Amino acid sequence: MKLKITIFSVILSLLPFPDIFAEESEFKGEITLTGVFRDINGNEAKFNEYNDSRNGAYGRLRLNYDTEKYFVDFKADDIAYDTQYYRLGGGMWGKFRADIYYNEFPHNFTFGARSFYQGIGGNYLTFPDPAPNPNIFSWNEFDYSIQRRNYGGRLGLEMLKPFYFDVSATREKRDGLYPIGVSLRNPGGPALEQLPMPIDYATTNIKVEGGYAKKPFFFSLSYFYSQFENDNNKLYFRNPAALPAFATTPDIFTLPPDNHYFKLAFKGAVKLPMNSKFSTNLAFSRAKSEADLISYYFNDAGAATPLTLSDPKFHGKIDTQNYDFVLSSNPISFLEGKIFYKHYKTSNKSDEIVTTDITSTPPAEVNDLFDYKKDTVGVELGFKLPAKFYLNTFYHYIRTKREREDISENKDDLYSVELRWNGLDFMVPKVGYERLHRRAKFEGPTDPDDIEFWVRRFDAAAKIRDTYKASIDISPIENLNFSVSYKHKKTDYENTIMGLTGEKSDLINIDGDFTVGKFVKLFGYFGYERIDSNQFQRQFTPPPPTNAGNPITGPTSSARFNWDAKQKEKEYDYGIGAEIYVIPKKLTFVLQHDYVRSNGFVDYTVFRALAPGETQDNIDLPQYDDYRQESYMIKAVYNVVKGLSLTVGYAYERFKYKDAQYEGFRYAVGAFPANNTAALTGAYAKPSYSTNIVFLGATYKF
Amino acid sequence: MGKRISLFISVLFVFLLVLITQSSVKGDSEYIGSEACKDCHGDYYKSFIKSIHNKKVIPGTPVNRDGCESCHGPGAQHAEKGGGRGVAILAFGKKVDAKAKSSKCLNCHEDSKQMAFWDMSKHRSASISCDNCHTVHSMKEKNLRAMDPELCFGCHTAIKIRANKQSRHPIKEGKTRCHDCHNPHGSFGTKMIKADGINELCYKCHAEKRGPFMWQHAPVEENCLNCHTPHGSNHLKLLTSKPPLLCQSCHDASRHPGTIYTRNQTFQGGAPSNRMYARACLNCHSNIHGSVGPAFPRGKAQVR
């Protein structure tokens, strides 16, 4: 609140200049009031995922006051709704500009979720003795939703040109509930509780920047500070699997710890002879956190088991350094280029905590500290060729070193070439090719009987990725624009036996608009995307035999076998629309239809004898985030008199979702009492909806 | 590495050589004043006088220099030849070289933090000029031809399609905009992002994921985009794929990480498993972005 008051005070103190209304001025604005009537069937949370659409009146306001010296600008959207936005800006032309704003919007996940826990919304969840009520209709109802409220301001001084100074501050409050889950036993099992995690976050960001901008120099120094505060650092809950002796001892799920972060950055550029420039970016940042650690856990028998910690507090600290050096040049009309070097390094200086549990094997665990370093050098060259051909090429060499047990180093060669032809005024075709060749230094186990010997994690695995692109933009006449593009990407994880072995995608886009005389504007788009990926895995129980995890020599049985999964996703969407100027500048009809459809499929293959009733097909997942979203809208805009327009319209939207992992959703899987039961709350289940909306509005411009 | 350094130095040397051997050329000019333009280009003149470029209090604006000719170049020859689009004048049309057009704007606007790194912009190398996005003769916000994201979607049609997917940032609602993450005028970051690294950018809004955590998930710490795709996905949470297969593509080990979870393990299957139905792995591994939970049970596995 203090920050809010400070920002408002600063801005307001700058605005009232005595001669502000004394000069030649222009005051203009726009007021819109829209009444909305809607009827929704199905999942309102998905329909209103980032919206607050309800029956009611929506207000929108724009005000602008402009003089030779001063300007003031005010915007307001969705007044009094959960998506409301306000911005007041102003300043003196060429001297300073400032603004303050307030913005909020929801992120709705699921309405009407259920849980047997009491205390939902807080950070202590419990249930009455002796056990959770198995009757799900008696459970408490609540909504999974997060509301973001963001406010801030900015002041920029231009009066000391070529020096400049900017300061900005924002604060975001986030409140709500988010679904998390916990296994009740250690290390896991069928018992699972989905819990509503309280979100009470506040993030404050402040940035101060000063600099000098006058050719041939540019310098800036900036300081960014960010503080994240979480009102709840732990979520306490009664574990239904706890032994009666520990019924009053809460189990604990840790929530994001408070953190603060700063970044100090210098940016500079100097123009060199022959249309060249040297630019640099030097930055140092530090993130710190602090958390009180938990000194017990619930073991598989449901007993709270003490832990010995080398330090009851964890202090997290990660430093990051970034250096960029770039020399760019356009020395001759047919050649431009850039060479650069980038160094990015994180240093993890967090505490290493030794946790000891005498009942476990091994009895002690220490957290690993991950950090990494990435160096990139690159050359980019652009050639203006004869006959209006343009050739852009680049080569980047990237070396990444990381603190990781499996792949500690990558060396990437990234090549790209793109040819564009501007030979015809009405058409620009483009073709491009890019190849990434990643080599990986594998430092995992050398024993082929250890499955890690075969696993290559896709984020760092050696791979060759080829990307082909082609596009064409056509404007044969002034009122017709048309573009078609195609992209094919293929990734081969060349050394991977276990894990993701390959990916392939094809993407086609068509987009266009056509204005027919003064009466109709037509527009439309079409997109098609197909994504395929393959992964190869092994299911096994631990040794013996020693080669249980070996996919080549290991045993094959109902419990130990290789399998693969081919994921296929096909998505297409299109939109068509028209603006029909029935009476030019008086009456306009707007028609719009959009459609998105995605079909996913997982084709499993098991390399073992099939179980009774099992086939290689009936184990597949035929619905894999399948959805269809369609919407229709018709709107008429009538300009009654100059400055006043009326709008009336109707919209229909439908979303249908099917997914094998949610079909036949159940709140409880397994029989109560809950120590072997999975109790879910309904998060993300059944998101389908359909809705009809009628809207009527008036806009007055002055 | 040695060969690459040699290559780097060689290219640098060639660049410097070219710089030293070239020289720039300047032409002569004759100015006739904005009043002369008004007679034929009345509408443009009217919009110019209402624009920020006509503010006399701002040092260096066209009105304080050569008016219309500050941007369009000297008009004497154009007038002498009886006018015509692009006749002896810079008309900012489609046929005009992008760099020639942008250079007019950069004469003034390069002296600003917004345009200081335009030479590093992918838009520049793709021959996008200032007037592709900005209309000079208006008093619209930032003089943009359309608002973000419609403006960006005009060229980036694949991103427009992605933004229609079921899992997405609130782009359509106007609560997240392209320029929140990208600097269209050029930056040091990859894909012109407004940060030195991907995660630094994501943490600006998702500060709770910044940690630093005691139990880290290495691929998460290195790059959010290992698992997420920012412009839209068919899978919840902007994931590139879906648990359990997404997780299993890295985690293959004895017991449940390597176990196949098929239709049989869904709610409707014969043996429902909490590793498959609903959120699959995330049913238990909820602190997937990092945790300060106890080492036991399996702190590394982010279950508390």
Image: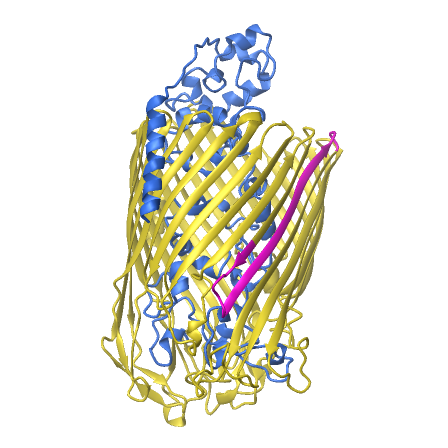
Would residue A681 appear left or right of A371 to someone viewing this image? right
* Image label count: 0
Instruction: Decide whether the magenta segment is chiefly helix, strand or loop.
Output: strand
Check if residue A701 falls in the magenta segment: no
Residue B160 shows in the view:
no
Q: Judging from the image, what is the letter of the chain drawn in yellow? A: A
Would residue B228 appear left or right of A249 to someone viewing this image? right
Q: Position of residue A83 (x, y in %)?
A: 52, 53
Which residue occupies the foreground of this view, A113 or A298? A298
- Please determine whether, in this image, residue A209 is positioned above or below residue A217: below
The residue depicted at 54 percent of the width and 40 percent of the height is B147
Q: Quadrant of residue A42?
A: bottom right
Q: Position of residue A251 (x, y in %)?
A: 38, 82
Which residue occupies the foreground of this view, A635 or B247? B247
Would residue A170 appear left or right of A684 to someone viewing this image? left
Task: Give the farthest residue toward the top.
Answer: B80
Image quarter hosting the N terminus of chain A: bottom left
Q: Position of residue A337 (x, y in %)?
A: 41, 34
- Please determine whether, in this image, residue A550 is positioned above or below residue A54: below
Q: Quadrant of residue A315?
A: bottom left
Task: Give the farthest residue toward the right.
Answer: A582
Check if residue A494 falls in the magenta segment: yes
The residue depicted at 48 percent of the width and 8 percent of the height is B32
What shade has chain B been given?
A: blue
Q: Position of residue A265 (x, y in %)?
A: 29, 45
Q: Which residues are magenta?
A: A490-519
- Please determine whether, in this image, residue A685 is positioned above or below residue B104: below
Residue B97 shows in the view:
yes
Which residue occupies the foreground of this view, A349 or A487? A487
